[in-house]
Image (cartoon, helix red, strand yellow):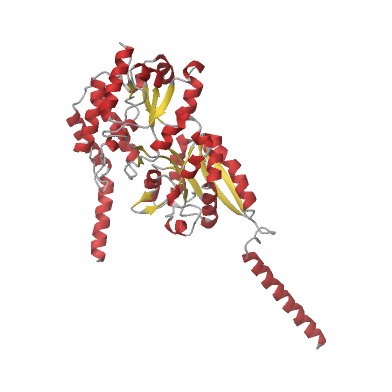
Amino acid sequence: MSGELRVNGARAALVAIAALVALAATLPGCRGNGAAPVTLRFWAMGREGEVVQELVRDFERENPGIRVIVQQMPWTAAHEKLLTAHVGDSTPDIAQLGNTWIPEFAALHAIEPLGSWLEGSTAVPESAFFRGIWATNVIDGTPYGVPWYVDTRVLFYRKDLLARAGYATVPQRWDEWVQSMEAVARLGGKGHYAILLPTNEYTPWTIFGLQTGSPLLSPDGTRGDFSGPEYRRAAAFYLDVFRRHLAPAVPGQLMMNVHQEFERGTFAMYITGPWQLGEFSRRLSPAMQSSWETAPLPGPDGPGVSVAGGSSLVLFRSSRHKPEGWKLIEFLSRPEQQLRFFRSTGDLPARRETWRDTALTSPPHMRAFADQLDRVVPTPMVPEWEQISVALQDCVETMVLGAKAPDSALAGLDRDVDRMLEKRRWMLERARRAHAEAR
């Protein structure tokens, strides 16, 4: 009898120990004591993929139960690789996506809707981000990404040439801006222009349309609206700039060396983005460094909007570690981490409070970006937008070079865009019929 009691007592002790071990495994801070850590796969592009490794090491020290494997890939291969991974059910847990890619991957049901994650988070408040940038991640009211870094376009200009022409700053209305460009062109003489508007860069043509209030596409995103009155106003403006010989009307492939011709004074203004800050500092001579500046874009009736760009962080639906992936997104979204990322890459931070740091307030060329980011709007949230942008670029080149009249060219562009969006119309019509039948 005493032997049975000893056996039963031993069994009871083993059961109690097993129960304690199981309980310990569920308690915060207990994971990692012999248990394998959760492994997150994080895909990032270009220089960002290299720099983020440093931030990830700090995240792992803060979260010893999570290990992050960062896979760096070139931007040129990233889109195709992500699509292939989705088709093959081998997507990462989280990834960096250019914010113009968000609609496509949301339409494919590849990325996780973030509404519930944001509702339960105090680390990623929507109000902490630039309004127009945040909007690039929202489709039909549902957020799918968190802005990681931002970019937009402003005006880089020769302030010495503008001053010689009688202007202390860049005017903020189109009509006054054109007057300043005429003064600069007169000052330069033959072979000199006020502004470079390359026909092989589609972003300016998009921006001018957004500035006139053009939706660019129909409200439901199923047809082009480039022949509408708003975009025709934009086209009339920029074509007039070419007609006045304020910009060189040459095909994109014949563009000159931008930095060299800017220093020579061949043109005095150029619409471009934050990556050019480093390029202008490196490629212009030391003597030229005090002669250039940046300014927010002029608009039809006052300060104009610009395009909302950048990259966002997304969770993939197929991830088995969404809570841990969301924790990494929260970590990378902290203001202090965004500042570290900016200092390492030059990528502009997405959180507004970081722009109060001296690293962003002291450099004079940064002020225009801080101002412009309060006036940015997203391009149409359809997966086909990049394809549409290229068609817009081709259309503008035909108008600038005189191959087609504006009304004919823009009507033709709408027809081309309608064909690109044919599948979208079919899908929306199918969804409407299904909804009607369900009622």
Q: Quadrant of residue 225?
A: top left
Q: Residue at x 49, y 16 (%)?
A: 287
Q: Is residue 218 left or right of residue 9?
A: left
In terms of depth relative to the viewer, which is nearer, 219 or 176? Answer: 176
Farthest bottom residue?
1
> Please, is residue 364 above or below residue 340 in the view?
above
Residue 201 in the image, given as x and y percentages of width and height: 35, 28
Q: Is residue 155 visible?
A: yes
Quarter of the rendering occupied by the N terminus: bottom right
Residue 15 in the image, given as x and y percentages of width and height: 70, 75
Quarter of the rendering occupied by the C terminus: bottom left
Q: How many marks?
A: 0
In terms of depth relative to the viewer, which is nearer, 269 or 14? Answer: 269
Q: Is residue 315 left or right of residue 136?
A: right
> Please, is residue 348 above or below residue 163 in the view?
below
Q: Is residue 351 visible?
A: no
Residue 253 in the image, given as x and y percentages of width and height: 35, 21
Q: Residue at x 72, y 79 (%)?
A: 12
Q: Residue at x 81, y 84 (%)?
A: 3
Q: Residue at x 41, y 51 (%)?
A: 144
